[in-house]
Amino acid sequence: MEAIEYALTVDEVLSCVQIEDEVIRIMRKKFLRTADSNRTRLSSFLEGATQITVSGKLSGICRDPKDDFILECAVTGSADIIVTGDKDLLSLSPYGAISILTPRQYLDNASSGANPLS
């Protein structure tokens, strides 16, 4: 959540229904909270996020095809960076002009003043 909080203050954050559902599923699994509790917490973080509509046009890119919607969200929203802990997505970095970073890499780049795209 630290990376989300930071990104909301300095970057434009993109999201879509599919990303939000995936984050809620992971939070439920890791923190054993209800989906409603997780959705409430996540929605407070994402109030300033730009919502992207994902249609499923982009497919067959990621070695886990269930993650293609994240790439489509980034491409549709003209993102520069995807921040994720997902190894299947991280293995693609970069995807075209989009850097794919872990939350730690993103925050480390920000704290060092480095360009997060390098």
Image (spheres, helix red, strand yellow):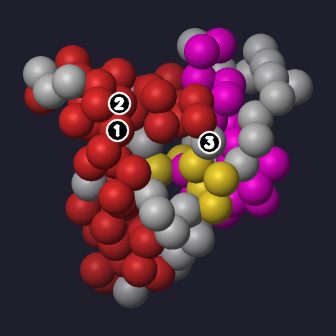
Label annotation for residue 16: 3
Residue 94 colored in magenta in the image: no
User: On the image, which quarter does residue 99 sit in?
Assistant: bottom right
Q: Are marks 2 and 3 in contact (CB under 8 Å)?
A: no
- How packed mark 3 is, by other alpha carbons closer than 10 Å (few <14, some 14-19, many 20 or more), is some
Residue at left 62%, top 42%?
16
- Per the rendered image, the range of residues in magenta is 65-82
Whole-Å distance between the Cαs marked 1 and 2? 6 Å
Q: Is residue 25 above or below residue 104?
A: above
Label annotation for residue 39: 1
Q: Return the disc, 3 or 1, that comes first in the chain's sequence.
A: 3
Residue at left 41%, top 80%?
9
Indicate the position of residue 85 as horizontal and vertical percent values: 36, 37
Type of residue at label 3? Cys
Indicate the position of residue 13 as horizontal and vertical percent values: 55, 63
Q: Nearer the viewer, residue 36 or 15?
A: 36
Name the residue tied to disc 2: 24
Whole-Å distance between the Cαs marked 3 and 1? 13 Å
Circle 3: element type = loop
Type of residue at label 1? Arg
Q: Return the disc, 2 or 3, that comes first in the chain's sequence.
A: 3
Residue 81 colored in magenta in the image: yes
Q: Are marks 1 and 2 in contact (CB under 8 Å)?
A: yes
Q: Return the disc, 1 or 2, that comes first in the chain's sequence.
A: 2
Residue at left 63%, top 61%?
50
